[in-house]
Image (tube, grey):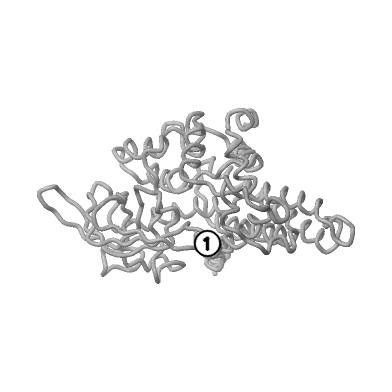
């Protein structure tokens, strides 16, 4: 891994990540192509579907080495979320068609789960899909709205939870559909986040025609696909490798920042907070390895995914908060232009100062998306404690 990251990954990509610069679609596609060329992109897929057949330890090494080397993240929607769902619930025809397109970059996927009024209570989705038949065959007509659609502005495909039976109980009338984003009747509107970025979107569906062959699993049984997918999403959100890299950056900042004539790292109160978050991170590493090993042995992530989601997001938020605090007054000015790779204007404070503020504000969402941490605690209470 280290030889590959040192010799094969362009320094331009690593420099952008290390300095908190914006990554564009081409950067992500280049990174995916590099990994796919080595057979490492879908590192948790079985070998018969294009995965490398790695052990739990190899996956852990991959995640941590990539993060420490400041590579871009793998966009999770196709590889980490939809891929496992298709492998478990998809037909042979769906697997043969869609999985290779995820690997070679033919499709950029986004996720159509949350709606206004259906976020934490995901089973309350109201986007409808009505089955019909015409001269072109069986199809669904989809109407409704999805929100917080991450990177939907880049996507050509979206996997959606849709309501196919409005009379059934909430979880029992939902289906899992694959929808072409270029279909007539789809409109995408940007949502600008707290730090000024266009990362998420609203997606509107008006009489969108979807072939019935794009139904994954059984009609009205999409909740099984939804739950299965969320266990992978929540594990990925834990971001162990990202926290390792962020902690190393925090240590460097604290060592180079002076307070009362001494390094900030020697300040007892600040050092105690750094020590606490490092201990928490080491504990989470172990929990993460145990869970991945269980999955590699044939198990399915359960409430452990919720545990990792809670602790992982809290740890990342604390590290980013401490990094911003360590920057002091230099974290106050914030220029959008300073996040561009070609920015050559005045630099205020340390090189990471602008990115520290942007990342702090952007990642306040970590404990909310993918199922809020409060919802994760309910899942743990029910599945583990039986409450």
What is the residue that sits farthest to the left in this orientation? 135
* Residue at image mark 1: 196
Q: Name the quadrant of the C terminus.
A: bottom right
What is the residue that sits farthest to the right in this orientation? 261
- Judge the density around disc 1: few (<14), some (14-19), many (≥20) Cα neighbours within 10 Å: few
Residue closer to the observer: 14 or 62: 14
Q: Position of residue 245 (x, y in %)?
A: 67, 47
Q: Is residue 340 above or below residue 303?
A: above
Q: Name the quadrant of the N terminus.
A: top right
Looking at the rendered structure, the number of numbered marks drawn on it comes to: 1
Q: Position of residue 79 (x, y in %)?
A: 45, 43
The answer, for residue 240, to whether it is visible in the render is no
Residue closer to the observer: 76 or 125: 76
Which residue is found at the position 25% from the left and 58% from the top? 185
What is the residue that sits farthest to the front in this orientation? 345
Which residue is found at the position 83% from the left and 64% from the top? 269
The answer, for residue 241, to whether it is visible in the render is yes
Query: Considering the numbered disc 1 on the image, is that residue within a helix, a strand or a loop?
Result: loop
Which residue is found at the position 39% from the left and 55% from the top? 224
Q: Position of residue 367 (x, y in %)?
A: 57, 63
Which residue is found at the position 75% from the left and 59% from the top? 326
Q: Position of residue 385 (x, y in %)?
A: 58, 65
Q: Is residue 41 above or below residue 208?
A: above
Location of residue 333 by image quarter: bottom right
């Amino acid at each position: 891994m280290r030889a590959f990251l040192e010799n094969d990954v362009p320094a331009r990509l690593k420099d952008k990540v290390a300095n908190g610069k914006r990554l564009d679609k081409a950067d992500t596609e280049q990174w995916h192509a590099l990994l796919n060329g080595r057979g490492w992109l879908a590192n948790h897929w079985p070998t018969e579907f294009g995965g490398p057949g790695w052990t739990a330890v190899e996956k852990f090494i991959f995640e941590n080495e990539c993060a420490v080397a400041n590579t871009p993240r793998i966009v999770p929607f196709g590889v980490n979320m939809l891929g496992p769902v298709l492998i478990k619930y998809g037909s042979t025809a769906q697997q043969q068609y869609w999985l290779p397109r995820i690997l070679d970059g033919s499709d950029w996927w986004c996720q159509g789960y949350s709606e206004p009024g259906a976020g934490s209570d995901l089973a309350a989705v109201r986007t409808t899909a009505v089955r019909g038949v015409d001269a072109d065959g069986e199809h669904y007509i989809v109407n409704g709205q999805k929100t917080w659609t991450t990177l939907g502005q880049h996507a050509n495909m979206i996997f959606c939870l849709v309501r196919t039976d409005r009379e059934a109980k909430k979880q029992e009338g939902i289906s899992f559909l694959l929808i072409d984003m270029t279909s007539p009747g789809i409109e995408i509107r940007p949502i600008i986040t707290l730090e000024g970025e266009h990362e998420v979107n609203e997606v509107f569906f008006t009489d969108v025609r979807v072939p019935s062959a794009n139904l994954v699993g059984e009609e009205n049984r999409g909740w099984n696909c939804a739950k299965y997918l969320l266990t992978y999403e929540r594990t990925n959100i834990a971001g162990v490798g990202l926290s390792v890299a962020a902690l190393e950056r925090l240590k460097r900042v604290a060592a180079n920042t002076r307070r009362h004539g001494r390094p900030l790292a020697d300040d007892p109160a600040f050092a105690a907070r750094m020590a606490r978050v490092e201990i928490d991170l080491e504990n989470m590493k172990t929990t993460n390895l145990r869970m991945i090993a269980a999955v590699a042995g044939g198990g399915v992530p359960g409430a452990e995914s919720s545990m990792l989601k809670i602790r992982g997001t809290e740890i990342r938020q604390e590290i980013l908060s401490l990094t911003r605090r360590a920057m002091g007054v230099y974290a106050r000015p914030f220029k959008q232009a300073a996040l561009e790779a070609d920015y050559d204007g005045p630099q205020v404070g340390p090189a990471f100062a602008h990115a520290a503020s942007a990342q702090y504000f952007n990642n306040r969402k970590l404990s909310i998306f993918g199922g809020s941490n409060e919802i994760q605690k309910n899942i743990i209470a029910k599945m583990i404690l039986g409450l």
